[in-house]
Image (tube, rainbow, N blue to C red):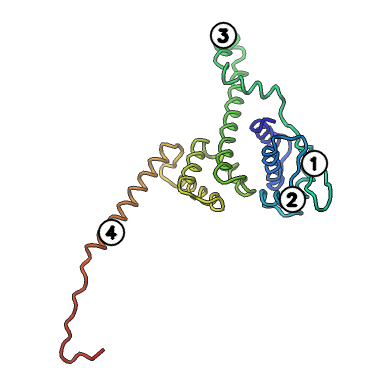
Amino acid sequence: MNYLQQILAFDDYRLYEQKLSAGQIALWHALMSINNKAHWQKWFTAANKTLESLTGLSRSGINSARNSLKQYDLINFETIGPHKATKYFIKQLYTSDSVHSSEQSGVHSTDRTEYIPETILRQNSGTLIKQNKTETKQNSRQSHAGVWENWQQLWGFPNAVAQQDLQEWAKEFTPDLLNHVIEYAGRRNVQARAADNYIDRVLQSYRQHQPPITTVTQAKKEELSHYNRTSEDFGRSQKYRYEAKPEPIRTPQKGDEPF
């Protein structure tokens, strides 16, 4: 199975065919992650405790979500016994032709447009514009899938809250900027449990900045400015610390009360 194509097809399914809850989305991605580690077996096992850990769902939440996914024909499952892991099957949502087309589009896109006669270009300009918009949208989804992969490399599989935030951030910020923030958090050794809140605060600061930060270049410039301000503040505090004069020692006077 092609992991990236499957995720893109799943996004299209949610957008055009069926709206899913955050729990259903989290469970589907968790099953994909487990099957990926199992080298894409047709049927694979997944323990409920593992799914609870990956999704943040309760046992009843997992049961409800998987029943819904089965009803939507996205997965199938078989319960073996009370003390054995459940077997799962994930339906492939893309076709082999779509993978081949996606792989070839970047290589031959220039050749396709170079030899189209001018008359055909005029007649089909609307079609070509729609095609370009579709390809641009698909490239954007692929890039944002890279954001998801970077997150997993640093902090493992995102929980349901982080998944929802990643989807919302992808609507507002470019993949390059999101990847930059994730990598910046990684360099600062932000832990997995704090990653979602940390990145949300950074992006909120981008929104509030005047003008708002929308590119990696702007983000790096602001980071350098923040570093310089912090260094200057620290330098001033150290200078005050070492230059501050100690209070003079008072010589006891006649009439002072004894200690």
Rendered image: mark on residue 238: 4
Q: Earlier in the sequence, mark 4 or mark 1?
A: 1
What's the amino acid at mark 4?
Gln
Of residues 241 and 129, the one nearer the viewer is 241
How far apart marks 2 and 1 lie (CA) works out to: 16 Å
Residue lying at 67% horizontally and 40% vertically, measured from the top left? 33
Distance from the alpha carbon under mark 3 to that under mark 1:
47 Å
Which amino acid type is marked by label 3? Tyr
Q: Is residue 86 left or right of residue 101?
A: right
Q: Report how far apart the C-alphas of labels 2 and 3 lie in the structure.
A: 56 Å
Vertical relation: 196 (above or below) 116: below
Compared to residue 66, the image places residue 244 above or below, namely below
The residue pinned by badge 1 equals 70
- Upstream in the sequence, badge 2 or badge 3? 2
Residue mark closest to the camera, 4 vs 3: 4
Residue under numbered circle 2: 48
Q: Helix, strand or loop at disc 4?
A: helix
Q: Name the residue carrying label 3.
A: 115
Mark 4 and mark 2 in contact (Cβ < 8 Å)?
no
Q: CA distance from mark 4 to mark 3?
A: 68 Å
Q: Earlier in the sequence, mark 4 or mark 3?
A: 3
* Residue at mark 2 to residue at mark 4: CA–CA distance: 55 Å
Which mark is first along the chain, 4 or 2? 2
Q: Amino acid at mark 1?
A: Lys
- Residue 200 point in image, percent of width and height: 52, 49
Pick the front one: 49 or 234: 49
